[in-house]
Image: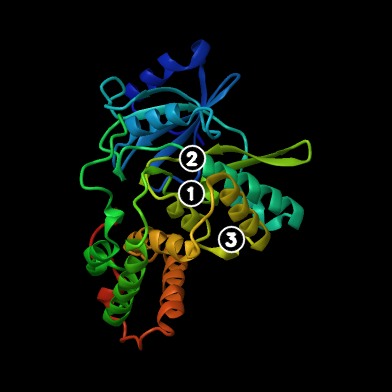
Amino acid sequence: MTEALPDEVTGWLAARLPRGGRIARIAQLPGGYRNQNLLIATDDDKFVLRRYLKGNTCGVEQELATRLSGVVPIAEVVDADPTGALAGEPVLLSRFVEGTSLDQVVLDLPAPEATELGHRVGSALAAIGTIRFTAPGFFSGPDLTPASGGADSADLITFTTSRLDDLVGFDSLEKTALLALAEHDQRALDAVPSEARLVHADFNGKNLLVTRRGGHWSVSAVLDWEFAFSGNPLSDVGNMLRFPEDTGPHFTTAFIDAFTADAGPLPDNWHHLSQALDLFALVDLLTLPSTHPLHAKVSDAVRTRITATTGRLPETEPRSNADRQPRRPPS
């Protein structure tokens, strides 16, 4: 299927393809809940055009690509128009990277291969965390300066409270239990020194391309950096281990072993801390419509954490239509 592009974008793209390449095909790539990723095929090469549909992080991603070059495998940026001054909208053009999404292969691998892949991914995450900033926070612009006041992740209780009215499928008793979980997790986070390292913030199997050559696995690219911020790398650990059934025990053990070997020893309660940091993302995902592909899985994961922490879920109230529907459009 060939996708149509606005004339301004097509003109910008045609002028920036290397060697005057002719656009032979444009096709939608999978994923992209916030942005649109298009495969751009020329007669002899392939690229990815990224269009920013919900929030413009083009300049941040372009600068991150520069900072990450030689640190971890990423898609090489060919050109970008962060303000949309030339293309009519913010766009980023990068080279297409061959590989398979980690989540499509990891569960089918024999134990030795899953272990090898876990080592590669753990080392990649440790390398990401070697990039440091002056303070924690979300990036205020393409210069990658963390915004004053720190990240949303400074206070899990406040963050969770701000989302309670928008949670989909959680009744009032479950919301109370979720807030109690946030308070429990915040106490653990309060005891941890502040970190100001690069966090991918969506570090999981769908954003990791892997390849097998010569009988060995490697990470070919870490994709989609639109949520990146300065903070604690354990956020990414929590994201990767969010759904243990998606990776399996051999990958998980090797992932942590390699991350620890390269990044340094973890605190004794690292698993709890990683889950606490990941709760920010889970709470945000719970505001998505119930039809969203992740909603049921995230709901189950949060309820499992509540049960594991408090010993049981509260007796739930009868569900009303209001509990089943989002109260605002998803972000």
Disc nearer the start of the sequence (2/3): 2
* Mark toward the viewer: 3 or 1: 1
Separation of disc 1 and disc 2 at Cα? 11 Å
Relative side of 26 to 326, left or right: right
User: For numbered disc 3, what is the local secondary structure?
Assistant: helix
Residue occupying image coordinates x 70% and y 53%: 115
Residue 253 placed where, x, y %?
A: 63, 59
Q: Quadrant of residue 158?
A: bottom left
Residue occupying image coordinates x 31% and y 82%: 319
Q: Residue furthest bottom?
A: 315
Residue 128, labelled with which disc?
Answer: 2
1 and 2 marks in contact (CB < 8 Å): yes
Q: Residue furthest right?
A: 215
Circle 3 is placed at which residue position?
246
Residue nearer the viewer, 80 or 183: 183
* Mark toward the viewer: 1 or 2: 2
Disc nearer the start of the sequence (3/1): 1
Relative side of 151 to 290, left or right: left
Residue 15 placed where, x, y %?
A: 41, 14
3 and 1 marks in contact (CB < 8 Å): no
Residue 259 placed where, x, y %?
A: 57, 49
Callout 2: 10 Å neighbours few (<14), some, many (20+)? many
Circle 1 is placed at which residue position?
203
Q: For the residue marked with disc 3, what is the amino acid?
A: Asp
